[in-house]
Image: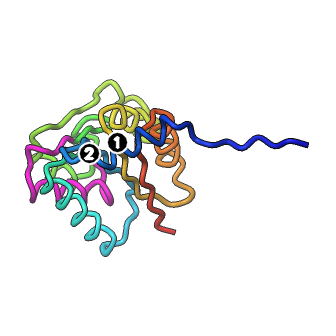
């Protein structure tokens, strides 16, 4: 009986190696759950701050939790290197997010998604975000279906994916 082993192709390894060794700035997407303890939010904020200080362009969405922390860190480092893509329009965002989003220079709204559920709009938004990045950093729970699907989609597009689990 023979078994096939599903190994990544050599060109996948080479692409990942090239991205890791790249010394110029990268387009990094940082996404994650809305339900994040404050201590984790502080770590995410520090990470986004450091990534942007290094000259990387950060792309995220405008929700509370992970994305809120990522925006806060990027705004402190260099607001011009932050792009926020909303799943719907600004008026559909929580009040505390809207206040922060008013400081974002590069803000993309998706009014055509206002008639969709937040889950559907978020899935479409995440697709747009990963289409613009070279690398995805994601913070999720094991049951975060939309985020985990986004990670799989990013891998299918041959992006480097770093996935952190909260649970």
Crowding at dot 2, Cα within 10 Å, few <14 / some 14-19 / many 20+, comes out as few
Position in image of residue 32 (x %, y %): 38, 54
Boundaries of the magenta span: 61-83
Along the line of sight, which residue is nearer the eye, 75 or 6?
Answer: 6
Direction from residue 132 to residue 78 in the image, left or right: left
Q: Residue at x 37, y 66 (%)?
A: 36
**Side (left or right) of 114 relative to 85:** right
> Element type at marker 2?
loop
Report the disc number at residue 91.
none
> Is residue 71 in the magenta section?
yes
Residue 107 is left or right of residue 123, and the answer is left
Please identify the residue farthest to the bottom as the structure is shown. Answer: 39
Residue at horizontal 32 percent and vertical 50 percent from the top = 30
Residue 79 as seen in the image, left or right of residue 160 = left
User: Front-most of 161 and 99?
Assistant: 161
Q: Badges 1 and 2: C-beta atoms under 8 Å apart? A: yes
Name which residue lies at 33% across and 70% down: 40
Question: Where 97 falls versus 38 (above or below)?
Answer: above
Q: CA distance from mark 1 to mark 2?
A: 6 Å
Measured along the vertical axis of the image, is residue 108 above or below residue 93? above
Q: Position of residue 81 (x, y in %)?
A: 13, 44
Q: Which residue is mark 2?
A: 22
Disc ID at residue 18: 1
| Residue 118: quarter of image | top left
Disc 1: CA contacts within 10 A as few (<14), some (14-19) or many (>=20) = few
Secondary structure, magenta segment, majority class? helix
């Amino acid at each position: 009986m023979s078994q096939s082993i599903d190994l990544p192709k050599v060109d996948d390894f080479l692409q990942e190696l090239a991205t890791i060794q790249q010394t110029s700035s990268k387009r990094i997407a940082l996404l994650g759950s809305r339900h994040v303890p404050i201590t984790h939010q502080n770590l995410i904020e520090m990470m986004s701050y450091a990534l942007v200080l290094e000259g990387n362009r950060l792309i995220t969405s405008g929700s509370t939790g992970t994305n809120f922390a990522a925006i806060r860190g990027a705004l402190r480092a260099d607001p011009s290197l932050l792009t926020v893509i909303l799943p719907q329009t600004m008026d559909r965002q929580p009040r505390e997010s809207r206040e922060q989003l008013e400081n974002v220079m590069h803000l993309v709204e998706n009014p055509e998604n206002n008639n969709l559920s937040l889950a559907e709009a978020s899935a479409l938004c995440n697709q747009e975000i990963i289409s613009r990045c070279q690398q995805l950093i994601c913070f999720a729970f094991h049951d975060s279906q939309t985020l985990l699907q986004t990670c799989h989609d990013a891998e299918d597009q041959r992006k480097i994916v770093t996935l952190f689990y909260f649970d």
